[in-house]
Amino acid sequence: MESRRAAVFRFGKPQSIKSAIVTITLFSIVVLGLWEFGDVNTYSFSKPSRIVAVLITDHARLIKAAAMTSRYVLTGLLVGGLLGFVAGLALGTISAVRTVAAFGVALPLSFPRTAAFLVVVGYFGVMSDRSVYAIAIYMTAALVGFMTFRATRSEIENPTHPEVFDGAVMLHRTRWSVTRVYVLPLVLPKSFTAIMYVASTIWPFMIFAEPTGAPSVSGIGNYVYDMFQSGRWDHLFASALVVALAGLATTAVAYLIQVAVLRRY
């Protein structure tokens, strides 16, 4: 009881989920009310009612554009996530190639993705969606590969459960068996966390990627760029909202897949 009182004194009384939801809801209502009825520059900042009107009247084109962009996003997450996970796991468990190859995993991660995208566009050429596919795969593979490698080596060198790790080594002769029984259940959550991070950032990145790498594609990135070029701010804010919701939805799907996969363990 005394330790609990000391914790409350240091950090404050923990807020319940119910009160947090009420607080966030009230704050959002106040902000939207001030935005809608306040003295706001409607040329640069469209009112919420006008944004909602665009979502209703132009929903078909927005859905079609988001569906087009989802091809790049989902391909990048699936292919890049698989490549990164396999590469990171192999580097973490196969000592013969780890020292040299680890730099190959870390270097792409440290190279800014915007700069890497320009290199990819220069190689594949503009007016083609191959460059957008390539950068989406690169973004996922680089991060997932690095996170998987780091998590794998951490669990082998400093096991979270040393007694379980020693038991797995004694019971299973092959390196893959030990990896499957002990390493995988601990590494998978961190790898999925990396995938979810990319899922939340890759959608906004498409606003830059599509106009640069595939300007002829009618995706949500080019939709945003076209609205910006034409000064149609109502449509710009509506498409930005679609991008945000798509990022949250993709992250949620990745989380549900993680839950389904981890249930096996």
Image (tube, rainbow, N blue to C red):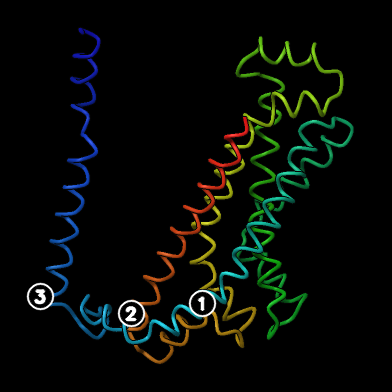
Reading the image, the residue beneath label 3 is 37
Measure how far apart labels 3 and 2 are at the Cα level.
20 Å
Give SS at disc 1. Answer: helix
Single out the mark in the foreground, 1 or 2.
Answer: 2
Measure how far apart labels 1 and 2 are at the Cα level.
16 Å
Q: Quadrant of residue 75?
A: bottom right
Single out the mark in the foreground, 3 or 2.
Answer: 2
Give SS at disc 2. Answer: helix
Is 151 drawn above or below residue 139 in the view shown? above
Residue found farthest to the right:
96
Reading the image, the residue beneath label 1 is 221
Q: Residue 38: x percent and y percent?
A: 10, 74
Q: Residue 102: x percent and y percent?
A: 77, 40
Q: Which of pointers 1 and 2 lies earlier in the amino acid sequence?
A: 2
Q: Quadrant of residue 191?
A: top right
Give SS at disc 3. Answer: helix
Q: Which of pointers 3 and 1 lies earlier in the amino acid sequence?
A: 3
- For the residue marked with disc 1, what is the amino acid? Gly
Kindly identify the residue that appears in the image at 79 percent across and 31 percent down.
93
- For the residue marked with disc 3, what is the amino acid? Phe
Pointer 2 local density, CA inside 10 Å: few below 14, some 14–19, many at least 20: many
Is 189 drawn above or below residue 174 in the view shown? below
Residue nearer the viewer, 255 or 222: 255
Measure how far apart labels 3 and 1 are at the Cα level.
30 Å
Is 231 drawn above or below residue 253 in the view shown? below
Query: In what quadrant of the picture does the C terminus appear?
Result: top right
Kindly identify the residue that appears in the image at 65 percent across and 47 percent down.
144
Residue 55 tag number: 2
Q: Residue 40: x percent and y percent?
A: 16, 77
Q: Residue 54: x percent and y percent?
A: 31, 83
Kindly identify the residue that appears in the image at 72 percent across and 25 percent down.
181
